[in-house]
Image (tube, grey):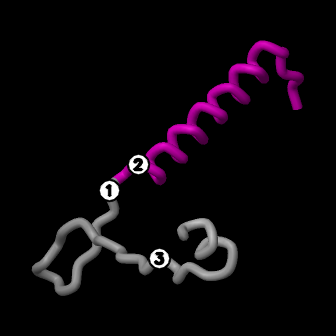
Amino acid sequence: MHTMSGRRELAIVFALAVLGLALVGVVAFAPWYGSVSYGDIGPSVIETIPPALGGVQAALVR
């Protein structure tokens, strides 16, 4: 096994870090598509229902 220079090792670590950040960016910002049926492909929308106000939140709203 050959030894590796510090510059080459740093370049490999930097390249892996850049590739990792690129992968995170693709996963975070790519539009995700889902379909209800095979012919209906479009952006999927997830609806959420906000939690009911209770306790401290209800007191702050008043």
Nearest the viewer among 48 and 13 is 48
| Horizontal arrangement in the rendering, residue 56 relative to residue 40 (left or right) | right
Residue assigned mark 1: 31
Looking at the rendered image, the quarter that the C terminus falls into is: bottom right
Q: Residue, x 30% and y 71% (percent of image)? A: 45
Calculate the distance from the C-alpha at mark 1 to the C-alpha at mark 2.
6 Å
Q: Give the number of the mark in front: 3 or 2.
A: 3
The three-letter amino acid code for the residue at tag 3 is Pro
Q: Residue at x 88, y 32 (%)?
A: 1
Residue underneath mark 2 = 29
Q: Is residue 4 above or below residue 60?
A: above
Check the image and name the residue furthest to the front. Answer: 62
Helix, strand or loop at disc 2? helix
Mark 3 vs 2, N-terminal side: 2
Look at 54% across and 47% down and name the residue there: 24
Q: Amino acid at mark 1?
A: Pro
Q: CA distance from mark 1 to mark 3?
A: 24 Å
Identity, as a three-letter code, of the amino acid under mark 2: Phe
Label 3: few (<14), some (14–19) or many (≥20) C-alpha neighbours in 10 Å: few
